Amino acid sequence: MADLLIELFSEEIPARMQAGAVADLRKLVTDGLVEAGLTYSSAAGFATPRRLTLALSDLPAMTRATREERKGPRVDAPEKALEGFLRSTGLTKDQLEARDDKKGQVWFAVIDRPGRAAEEVIAEVLEAAIRNFPWPKSMRWGAGNLRWVRPLHSILCILTDEAGARVVPLEVEGITAGDSTEGHRFMAPGRFSVTSFEDYAAKLSAAKVMLNPQDRAEHIWSDATSQAFAQGLEIVEDKALLAEVSGLVEFPVVLMGEIREEFLGLPPEVLQTSMREHQKFFSVKNPKTGRIEKYVTVANRETADGGATILHGNGKVLAARLSDGKFFWENDLRTVERQGMEGMAAPLMNVTFHNRLGMQGARVERLTVLARAIAPLVGADADMAAQAAKVAKADLCSEMVYEFPELQGLMGRYYARHAGLDEAVAAAAQEHYSPLGPSDAVPTAPVSVAVALADKIDTLAGFWAIDEKPTGSKDPYALRRAALGVIRLILENGVSVPLDALVNMARDAYVGVYQRIGRPRLIEQIRADLASAADLSHFLSEEDKAELETLEASYEQAEFIADRQMGLHNFKLDARFEAVRADLLSFFADRLKVHLRGEGVRHDIIDACFQLGGQNDLVLLVKRVKALQAVLETEEGANLLAGYKRANNILTAEEKKDGVEYSLDPNPKFAEGDEEKALFAALDAAEPSIVEALAAQDFTAAMGALATLRAPIDAFFDKVVVNSDNQIVRRNRLCLLHRVRKVMEQAAVLSAIEG
């Protein structure tokens, strides 16, 4: 058995591509070897900025010899059929065997494939992997045709067994495989030979190369945290930056530098973002004050002066970057002081939110109306919620957010504080974007919740009105995330508000603001376009075009096109709005199923509660769903469900057969046995309890009352024959089953539950 070592040595590979490249190399090589009949016991891949490495163990010296028998056409088959069979096998006619078959004599091909040397298979597979490597971006260089992420310099490919190491003969575009590699570019230049993976790893380590990216990351983090701890400071954790930096260096040297005093007054997030994005520096904070005071950079070499020159150069570049940040910060503060937050937000009236949903400024007006309407539902002060919505998007006009878009919201909080606004208003400026995903924290402050709900429900209603909904895997406007945000805001804050009421509020805000702000300007623009014979039909359906032709005045035509373009007709016309709202609520239902599945709630139980209709209060719906699941997870609940399904199946079958509906009230005087009488009594006792508990929104009690029906239903089916010969008794028993179904379906449509 032999071990295989492969190294592809090139110019610097971008850090973001290294992990994927290692996985691709391992897959291409191992899949190719196995397909060719060459097995292995383990495979490990590694990457540094200048090399991809793959080590495989326990490869056989040769692939196994194989014999394959393939059945062909009959001996008397047409000549063309025989020719096709010969082409597929690679044999000649005299190499075939005629054998007796139940339909006569048939040609058989016996194909013997001798074993192949491991070196031959490896060379073939590795060449194919190199030539077909799936880099996200690649380049050609020189006069060759090979494409690689950066110019490929050398290939190391050796097999090592008891006899020693031997080079696998391979040449790709003039690059011949060998047994040598290079160490660190600066600290250990020059090539050296290796004989095994252990020898390779040891010599690379001696040549100042840390092969394993995980080792580099651990070294960086350990050294950085130790240096910070020695000075009473802490490193701001940034796993993404750590992974990136460990892919930029082969021999990490951690250095800590100073931030000039004049920049220490900047918000810590500004310092951190600027240093991370532009310089790939880690931020070092004072745990007592939370202030960013120093930075950590990772060099790729040791220097005689202990990194002093590197830190000096980095300090100069950092000062220039932070000077920009300081300039933006101070300019924004002056804007807030002179104009206030609403003045800062004024340019939003000229910023497009979406070409069919108007300007950001109009959207801010809608959010203000919406937040005021939602505030009482979440326990927020209406005026404060409206004020927060008015200024929540103001920082989009700031120079700081223009430079660092990822700071939107956070900078709004700082600017609102500087403007002297209430802390709840300032917090809402940052928190109204949340939650941004399933793991993001949900705002709990009432004002923040009101503005966050307004922001998301406005987005969803608007895009539904213009029929820009997610399709398949495409969701360019992150509408699934917005819907999940609404669901989490409602559930995690216990906000008992019907979803359809929120959609109605969004409609009213949209119509009112559009009529007041956007419509007059848009109509004038469309009239000008009509006058210049511009084609505006791309906004219109065929039905709309037919209706447009009936309008003669240019003003009427402009009004018509404007309302279609902005989706306003889907809000103003009740029939259209009902369709939009129903579709949006259905979308919420799908998102809720996804969300609850993550919490272990069965989708069919969610369906059973949804199908009751009118389940738009998510807090109550989830309480009902969880109470129902808790009952059904017990043995008693499972048996109760089985009894319901038996009653429902019998009733459905008999109604279909008889062509009538057995929905009259059953009469207990026709009950013949104790079990039938007991079921009547149980229904009489359980139904008022279920109705009362549901009215009180006590779903646990309702499900408990439902569970009391289990025993009498079981006893009824054990002892009573529903299809009695006495037709009066039969009809009465079918009506009794209808009552069983009706009583139980007050809690949920149990027929939707699987199993």
Image: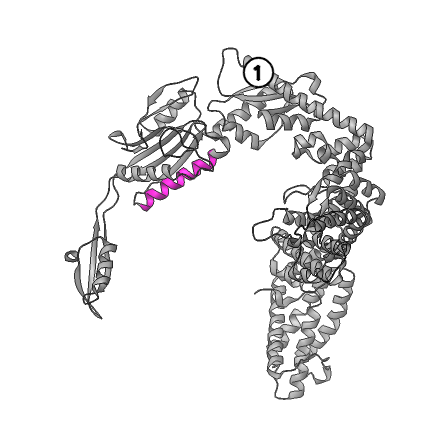
**Does residue 678 sit above or below 237 in this rendering?**
below
Q: Which residue is found at the position 60% from the left and 50% from the top?
A: 598
Q: Quadrant of residue 157?
A: top left
- Of all residues, the one furthest to the front in this rendering is 532
Decide: few, some or many residues near mark 1? Use Cα within 10 Å; few <14, some 14-19, many ≥20: few
The local secondary structure at tag 1 comes to helix
The single residue placed furthest to the bottom in the displayed view is 726
Quadrant the C terminus occupies: bottom right
Residue 8 appears in which quarter of the rendering? top left
Residue placed most toward the observer, 753 or 699 = 753
- Residue 641 percent across, percent down from the top left: 62, 67
Dominant SS type (magenta): helix
Seen in the image, is 62 located left or right of residue 752? Answer: left
x, y percent for residue 558: 74, 53
Q: Which residue is mark 1?
A: 313
Which region of the structure is painted magenta?
18-35
Furthest toward the top, the residue is 305
Q: Nearer the viewer, residue 11 or 539?
A: 539
752 is higher (above) or lower (below) than 588: below
Hey, what amino acid is under mark 1? Gly
* Residue 414 appears left or right of 126: right
Percent of width and height locating residue 289: 72, 24
| Colour treatment of the image | one colour
- Near-viewer residue (540 or 381): 540
Q: Quadrant of the N terminus?
A: top left
